[in-house]
């Protein structure tokens, strides 16, 4: 993107205009998320910058919305529900998903394309349709409005992510390692846990992180499949946004942004580690 | 071991040579043997089969899991969009009688008698209101008609009950009805049950009607058996202690006056029945049709109501799908909904239009970014990529709340515009609760899904093509438009389909920032599930949307391939 020294004036103008346009688009991408962080420290119950905040008056900032989040029983109940649902759903997705991904990566799998299409389908079907179907079907089974109903629904939604990341990791897997392990006397189970698993672990964990964020972030399905007893954090935020909007939402949002930055870093580190282990990238 | 010939440089025991040897050996008659003495081909086939089975065994648990938790619900939804057994289950007799109706005028007395019996049973089971609200989706007013009828239907047949009881008091006694109707085996069971000390512990055996009664008095037997079952299940009483409904007497009257076979019973019962049959011929009669039309509600004379019942009497219906495309199933056939009730085509069009707009905005905003990222040195572009990935990873609710806060009339964007002086304070822009709000917020939310596939395609475009074009005299614009852009089209295709698929099914964001004009078809589906409780219509709308998404997904698979879905 360097401008050659012989560029004409028109080219220069266009080059810088292009950079400004890109800058504006980046601003569009990131500004909304960054704006809510200072707003969450607002001392008033407003959703905009007060004159005091613009003048950097320390009194205009406060932690009261965070305090509200950590003391309000509704928000706390929602937080605990999220903490109870997401890890269990993730565990189911990862356990079943990894096993199936290992199966799918074998050289001779009958109906591979059809199976893959079915396993990926929860990611393709619009959430509202999944939610509607699950609501109808789970009410027939009496699982609508139960903890396990929500957990199983979320596990199903997280599975495509595990399948995709783990099969991608297995593409570069050196099969002679399992043969060597079998040659040395290890059974298939031992080979899986001692040889294959450590090598594909980065892929498994990043698939797990995707599955976790899917469940933790999910609101449409839980809205229909769950009942008041399974009210999760996104659900509570959804209610808050629709009915009684309070700046506590911004405090929660800020906490979630920090959480997603942590997850993003985690996935990125795992990706690099996995590529290094498979020798795909030098650095 | 024979040696390999031709291009194979290796001689001796390579797998290829072994297979070729086995082939040759097989052709010449003597089979090549594996170490355990079985023919090599069979042994290889066996191990291949074992491998396939092992792979399937690993996949099976997940496949079953997805089938149960995900595919079955989707299938259930598709089924619900055509399922319609409520009419034929609630009004079984009426549906049969209606076959004779020609669609003109009011059905005959026979049909009204069947309707009376069906509604009596339904009102005891409290099913008639459900049926009423189902049919109300098709013809307004049916719901209140059914509720009203449910209240009055008790009186039907009272005139016959009184006459039977006047004739002989025994007709009032539940015991008479038991000996007339109950299966002898059931009576034995019941006596054994009644003789128990703790009869409250075990439930009373379920009533069974006797074959004799079914044959001799078919209508009475059917209705009485329903009466007995309802007494047992709904009221938790015993049919041995309750006088039957009035309408059972009417059924008895119909049976006795219409070709009754006197020889089926013996003893006292025969005498009682013979007496009743003789007297019934001169009973004061009651016209059920007049009772319905004049006493209960004159709407029962409306062919529209009957037409609706008939149109929805089959166990499957296209009615929900027709409603979903603004048509309706009327007694006269399929026709368009009245102008003021046509909303779904408009909603589908709006969903398409807004998804297109969002897709195009994503292309316009995503293309420069992807271009910039793919032309910068790796270190810088990785850094800038974080700015794309951070929104991608941030909770959807967080991004939606951010836009709700920013776009409000008293929100940050309007504040800034007023402060700059672009907009007068009293004239703040309406950016939320309309289409503008939905388009802005969803473009922001879906932009990473456009940038990432575009970027991965652009990264693979070799830079020297553009350089070659320029060295051959192309201007910057020609080099871009004729050389670079065509090579980036696969990325645009992949990103566009992805964004489009995601946006037509969106629910949360339109619900929060869309107001009434910026909502999608998914919001209507949610409304029918949780507010209007018209599940069939919700299922039909969902099925149409699903079919559309699957079509797009098929295109995506053709253009990009499912296996190439990459995450971040």
Image (cartoon, grey):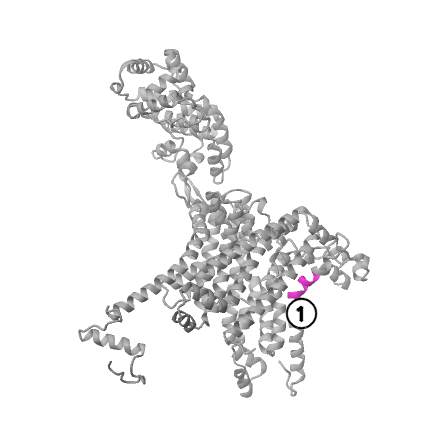
Farthest left residue? B29
Under circle 1, the secondary element is helix
Q: Position of residue B176 (x, y in %)?
A: 36, 16
Q: Is residue A18 above or below residue B428?
A: below
Q: Quadrant of the C terminus of chain B?
A: bottom right
Task: Name the main secondary structure of what is drawn in magenta.
Answer: helix
Q: Is residue B374 above or below residue B532?
A: below
Mark 1: few/some/many CA within 10 Å (<14, 14-19, 20+): some
Q: Is residue B402 left or right of residue B152?
A: right
Quadrant of res B206? top left
Determine if the magenta segment contains residue A108: no
Determine if the magenta segment contains residue A29: yes
Can the viewer see residue B14? yes
Q: Is residue B240 above or below residue A19?
A: above
Residue wearing tag 1: A24
Magenta segment boundaries in residue numbering:
A27-35
Q: Is residue A106 left or right of residue B521?
A: left
Q: Is residue A28 left or right of residue A206?
A: right
């Amino acid at each position: 993107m360097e401008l050659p020294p012989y560029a004409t004036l028109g080219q220069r103008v266009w080059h810088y205009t292009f950079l400004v346009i890109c800058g504006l688009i980046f601003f569009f991408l990131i500004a909304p998320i960054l704006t809510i962080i200072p707003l969450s420290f607002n001392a008033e119950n407003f959703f905009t910058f007060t004159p005091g905040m613009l003048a950097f008056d320390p009194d205009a900032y406060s932690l009261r919305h965070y305090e509200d989040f950590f003391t309000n029983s509704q928000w706390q109940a929602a937080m605990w529900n999220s903490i109870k649902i997401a890890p269990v759903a993730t565990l189911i997705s990862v356990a079943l998903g990894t096993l199936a991904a290992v199966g799918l990566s074998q050289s001779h799998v009958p109906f591979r394309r059809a199976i893959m299409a079915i396993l990926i389908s929860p990611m393709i079907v619009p959430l509202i349709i999944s939610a509607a179907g699950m609501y109808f079907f789970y009410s027939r089974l009496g699982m609508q409005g139960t903890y396990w109903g929500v957990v199983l629904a979320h596990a199903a939604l997280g599975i495509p992510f595990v399948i995709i990341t783990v099969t991608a990791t297995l593409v570069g897997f050196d099969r002679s390692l399992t043969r060597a392990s079998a040659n040395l006397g290890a059974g298939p189970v031992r080979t899986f846990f001692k040889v294959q698993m450590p090598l594909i672990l980065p892929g498994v964990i990043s698939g797990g992180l995707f599955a976790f964020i899917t469940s933790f972030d999910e609101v449409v399905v839980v809205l229909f499949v769950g009942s008041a007893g399974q009210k999760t954090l996104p659900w509570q935020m959804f209610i808050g946004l629709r009915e009684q909007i309070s700046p506590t939402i911004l405090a929660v949002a800020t906490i979630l942004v920090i959480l997603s930055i942590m997850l993003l870093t985690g996935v990125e580190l795992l990706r690099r580690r996995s590529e290094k282990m498979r020798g795909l990238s030098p650095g | 071991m024979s040696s390999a010939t031709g291009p194979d440089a290796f001689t001796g025991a390579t797998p290829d040579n072994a297979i070729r040897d086995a082939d040759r050996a097989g052709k010449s008659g003597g089979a090549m043997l594996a170490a355990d003495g079985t023919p090599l081909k069979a042994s290889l086939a066996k191990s291949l089969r074992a491998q396939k089975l092992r792979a399937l065994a690993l996949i099976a648990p997940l496949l079953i899991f997805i089938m149960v938790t995900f595919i079955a619900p989707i299938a259930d939804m598709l089924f619900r969009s055509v399922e319609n057994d409520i009419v034929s289950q609630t009004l079984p007799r009426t549906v049969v009688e209606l076959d004779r109706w020609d669609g003109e005028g009011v059905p005959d007395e026979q049909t009204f008698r069947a309707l009376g019996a069906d509604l009596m049973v339904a009102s005891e089971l409290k099913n008639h209101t459900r049926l009423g609200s189902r049919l109300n989706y098709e013809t307004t007013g049916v719901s209140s008609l059914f509720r009203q009828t449910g209240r009055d239907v008790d009186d039907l047949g009272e005139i016959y009950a009184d006459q039977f009881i006047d004739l002989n008091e025994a007709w009032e006694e539940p015991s008479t009805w038991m000996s007339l109707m109950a299966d002898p085996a059931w009576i034995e069971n019941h006596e054994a049950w009644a003789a128990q000390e703790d009869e409250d512990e075990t439930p009373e055996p379920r009533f069974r009607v006797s074959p004799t009664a079914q044959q001799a008095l078919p209508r009475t037997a059917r209705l009485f058996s329903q009466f007995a079952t309802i007494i047992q299940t709904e009221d938790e009483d015993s049919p041995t202690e309750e006088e039957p409904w009035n309408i059972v007497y009417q059924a008895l009257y119909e049976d006795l006056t219409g070709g009754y076979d006197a020889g089926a019973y013996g003893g006292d019962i025969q005498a009682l029945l013979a007496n009743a049959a003789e007297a019934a011929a001169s009973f004061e009669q009651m016209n059920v049709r007049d009772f319905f039309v004049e006493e209960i509600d004159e709407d029962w004379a409306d062919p529209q109501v009957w037409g609706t019942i008939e149109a929805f009497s089959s166990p499957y219906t296209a009615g929900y799908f027709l409603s979903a495309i603004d048509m309706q199933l009327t007694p006269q056939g399929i026709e368009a909904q009245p102008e003021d009730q046509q909303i779904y085509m408009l909603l589908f069009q709006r969903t398409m239009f807004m998804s297109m707009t969002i897709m195009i905005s994503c292309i316009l905003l995503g293309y420069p970014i992807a271009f910039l990222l793919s032309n910068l040195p790796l270190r810088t572009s990785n850094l800038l990529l974080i700015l794309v990935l951070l929104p991608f990873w941030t909770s959807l609710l967080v991004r939606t709340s951010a836009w709700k806060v920013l776009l409000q009339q008293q929100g940050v964007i309007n504040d800034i515009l007023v402060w700059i002086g672009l907009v007068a304070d009293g004239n703040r822009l309406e950016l939320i609760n309309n289409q503008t709000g939905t388009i802005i917020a969803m473009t922001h939310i879906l932009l990473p899904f456009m940038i990432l596939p575009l970027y991965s395609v652009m990264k693979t475009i070799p830079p020297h093509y553009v350089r070659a074009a320029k060295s051959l005299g192309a201007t910057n614009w020609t080099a871009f438009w004729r050389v670079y852009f065509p090579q980036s089209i696969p990325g645009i295709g992949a990103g566009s389909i992805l964004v489009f698929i995601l946006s037509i099914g969106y629910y949360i964001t339109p619900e929060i920032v869309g107001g009434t004009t910026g909502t999608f078809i998914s919001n209507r589906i949610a409304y029918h599930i949780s507010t209007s409780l018209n599940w069939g219509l919700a299922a039909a709308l969902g099925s149409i949307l699903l079919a559309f998404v699957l079509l797009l997904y098929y295109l995506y698979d053709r253009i990009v391939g499912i296996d190439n879905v990459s995450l971040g």
